[in-house]
Amino acid sequence: MTKRRRPGAGRKVAEDRFWGNAFVPSDSPLSIRPTSVPAAVVRSLGPTPLALDPAVVERHLTAVYEEAVRAATALAAANGLLAGEEEDGD
């Protein structure tokens, strides 16, 4: 009879060999400073190639980016990662 292997047992070793050592976080996490212009990415890409009016599309994408910045800022604040006033001068 053959030995029964556990499923995925050899896969973990292969993943470790491929990806390398596990990530070890630093002692102090980086502070996060929210952007004041969340739509900068949308504008930098130029007009959208959608069949709709580009102004309408940009307005909707800007609203999505602004909401994403709000959510990310709230998560950072909840975890104590927001940059303080003294760190904003960078």
Image (cartoon, helix red, strand yellow):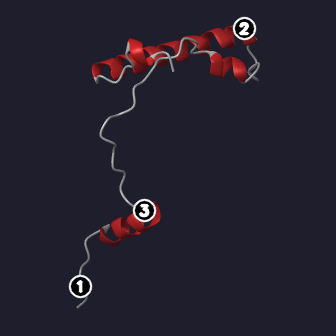
Q: Element type at marker 3?
A: loop
Quarter of the image with the N terminus is bottom left
The label nearer to you, 2 versus 3, is 3
* Residue under numbered circle 3: 20
Amino acid type indicated by mark 1: Lys
Q: Which residue is mark 1?
A: 3
Residue sitting at 33 percent across and 18 percent down?
Answer: 77
Where 18 sits versus 59, above or below? below
Which disc is residue 55 wearing?
A: 2
User: Label 3 is placed on what type of residue?
Assistant: Gly
Considering only order in the chain, which callout, 3 or 2, is on the residue closer to the N terminus? 3
**Residue pictured at 54% horizontal, 17% vertical:** 65
Disc 3 crowd, CA 10 A, few/some/many (<14, 14-19, 20+)? few
Q: Name above or below for residue 70 compared with residue 27.
A: above
In which image quadrant can residue 32 be found?
top left
Can you give x and y, in whole percent of width and height, for residue 51 in the image?
A: 76, 18
Between discs 1 and 3, the one toward the N terminus: 1
